[in-house]
Every structure is written in structure tokens, then in C-alpha cells.
Amino acid sequence: MIDLPQCRIPKTELSTVHAYQLISGQGISSLRRIETTVRELGPHEVRVRIRAVSLNYRDLMVAHGNYVPVSGKPVVPVSDGAGDVVAVGSAVTRFRTGDRVINTFFPAWLDGAPSAEKTTQTFGAGSDGVLAEEISVSETALVTIPAHLDYAEAASIPCAAITAWNALFVEGSLKPGDSVLLLGTGGVSIWALQLAKAAGLRVIITSSSDEKLQRARVLGADEVINYRTTPEWQEQVLKLTNGQGVNLVVEVGGEGTLTKSIAATAMGGTVAIVGGVTGFAGTPVDPLTLVGGAKRLVGIFVGSRTMLEDVCRFVTVNQTRPVVGRTFPFEQAQDAYEYLEAGKHFGKVVINVIDSHPFTLNFGS
């Protein structure tokens, strides 16, 4: 980390920055690189020079208009960014210049249970996100990066890691020795795999790719299932758990997987719904399968800043390094979106913002 308590960045270098905008509902092709003016900081705001951002399936939903009501106005997309504090407002107490930070997913959800008030605003959907060279945000919307992580790794934390943490340890209430089923090898699932193994959980994971399953084994997966060659994978899960099922399923699939996830869950267990890649239209759920097995479905809507801080402490203690599947330069942001949409990734897809526009610090007065 570079400590910059006496560094001054010339005003001319801060006047404009590059960013991307897209129009929700008009697809990935609407992504455009623009120049935008840097605004003055409020007393409690922090300016962050973004070095890396990571993409989530949610970013595809925003592009295609499937996440929030479409306004027709351009928005700076992407929710997850990592970078350096380059300026602070007059009343900021949480950070100083030179600190390495990541942003929260919900700027207003600091702690406690979710509410409409806390979760109305999100980065990269209804309001501008972090696919930009610089952002200005409230100091309360930032958390310090674990010291052992680089920027690309750190950028993978804000959405995927909090979601996995919430599913496993907050709503899932899992403890060492419990079992969890993870669907696929995307960002949330791989984060959940790494967190689960560090916490002493038994992990079963699915994929359509034997190569990806082998990589999951290297990360510690106890059992793997190819859902193409084993379409009734819920039966295999039951076999692997002596007919009991798992304590928790992290459900990311949607149509075609939810009923199987419920069947693979142990009595008294939980299906944590964190997304629906294929949607949930027409998904039949028999309430008796929940009542008879004392099972529950719970929706996971990312998480709070406190959860993010908990993840960062856990990652630091265990020296966990998240899996960055592939990185793209800032100029190839659209290629990164298309790569994610094609489902080729294992772990996180990251855009390195800093590579596109080297950040020059001017020391002295």
C-alpha cells in the first residue's frame, strides 16, 4: 500500500475521468466509454481511484433490463470495485489517502436485518456503479481490503463473497461438519466453496464440465457431480449423504434446479436462493415437500457492510485467495461481459481498470 498523506494530485488531472455507461434493457451492445467530470467531494465522501472491478450475473441482468425497472437513462454499471483512496472530504474519519478499499453492494445497508430503505440503492443499477476510473462515495460505503489480496482478488468480494457468507453462515447457520451443495462454478459458488472448506464444511458441487469439477476438487470440494452425465443429480446427492441430504443448498440455477435442490436437502435443512440463471417461471414447488421435511426456502439479497467486514476478517485469518478466472483490460469491457454471458468462466471475471490509464502520483507541493 502507498501511504499518501502529503501527496497532492493536480486539479487538472482530476477534472475528467473515463467511465462506461449502458442503458438497461438495450443489452451489452449499449455499453459505451465516456468522459465524465469529477465532482467536488462532500464532507463525508471519499474519492476512490478504481483499479479493478469484477462482474456478476446481476450485471448481465441490468444490461438486459431484467434486474430493475428500465428507466431509459444511461447508468455507470457494475457493483464491485477495488482501488485506492485519493481524496477525502473534510469530515471523513474512516479512511485516509492511500488506503486500499472495496465498496459495499448496498450503500445504506450497514448492519442488521434488510429493509426496503436499506436496499433501495445499489451500485450499478438504479444509481451509478464502479466501472469508472474514479468514483466518489460516502465513507460508510467502503471497507478496507485484506492486506494479502491484490486488487483483482479484492474486487471479487463485494457481491459474490457477501452473498456466499450470508447463505452459509447467516441465513444457513452452518457449523463445522455440516454439508452444503453448490450448483455450478460461478463466482458465488466458488466463493462459497472456499469459505465452506475454511470453516470445516463438507462440500458437494455440480458442473457440466469435468475440467471445472477437477479444479473444484483442487480447491477442496469433497464430492463432485457432472449434471449433464447425471441429470438426476439430486439422487446422487442423497447417495453421497447416506440418504440424508445436505444441510444447505446454495441455489443459483432456477427453473429445472429448484425442485431438485429441495429434494437434495436434508430434513430441517435450507435452500438458499441467491439467483436464478434460468429464471423461475413455471417452476413447480409442492409445499408438502417443504412441510413434510421441515425444510425452508430463503432468499439471499447479498448482505450488509457488517457481513462484508466479517468476510474480510475471515479471509484474512485464513489467508484465502479468491479465484479470478480471467481478467480483461478496461478497453475490452464489452468482451468481459460477453465472456461472462457465454458461461466460460470459473470463478470471477475481472476488468483491470488501471491498465487502461496509468495513475501518476505527483509527490510534493
Image (spheres, grey):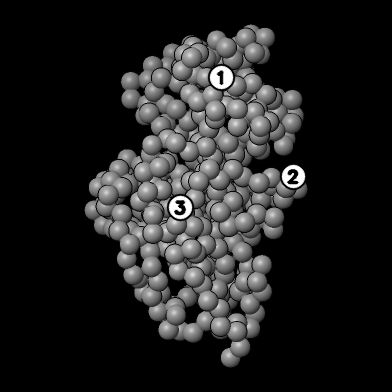
Q: Secondary structure at mark 2?
A: helix
Label ID, residue 93: none
Task: Name the quarter where the C terminus is drawn.
Answer: bottom right
**Mark 2 vs 1, N-terminal side:** 1
Compared across the picture, whether 203 is left or right of 25 comes to right
Residue displayed at 53% across by 76% down: 360
Compared across the picture, whether 354 is left or right of 242 comes to left
Amino acid type, callout 2: Asn
Mark 1 touching mark 3, by CB under 8 A? no
Q: Nearer the viewer, mark 3 or mark 2?
A: 3
Q: Secondary structure at mark 3?
A: strand
Residue 310 locus on image (x, y percent): 67, 48
Q: Residues within 10 Å of mark 2 (few under 14, many from 20)?
A: few
Compared across the picture, whether 17 is left or right of 192 comes to left
Query: Is 278 above or below relative to 350?
Result: above
Q: Which residue is mark 1?
A: 225
Residue 357: quarter of image: bottom left
Task: Name the quarter where the N terminus is drawn.
Answer: bottom right
Compared across the picture, whether 63 is left or right of 181 comes to left
Query: Is 235 above or below relative to 6?
Result: above
Amino acid type, callout 3: Phe
Q: Cα distance, mark 3 to mark 2? A: 28 Å
Q: Secondary structure at mark 1?
A: strand
Q: Residue furthest front?
A: 211
Please tell me which residue lies in front, 92 or 217.
217
Q: Cα distance, mark 1 to mark 3? A: 30 Å
Amino acid type, callout 1: Ile
Residue 188 locus on image (x, y percent): 54, 38
Residue 271: quarter of image: top right
Q: Which residue is mark 3?
A: 328
Q: Which residue is mark 2?
A: 318
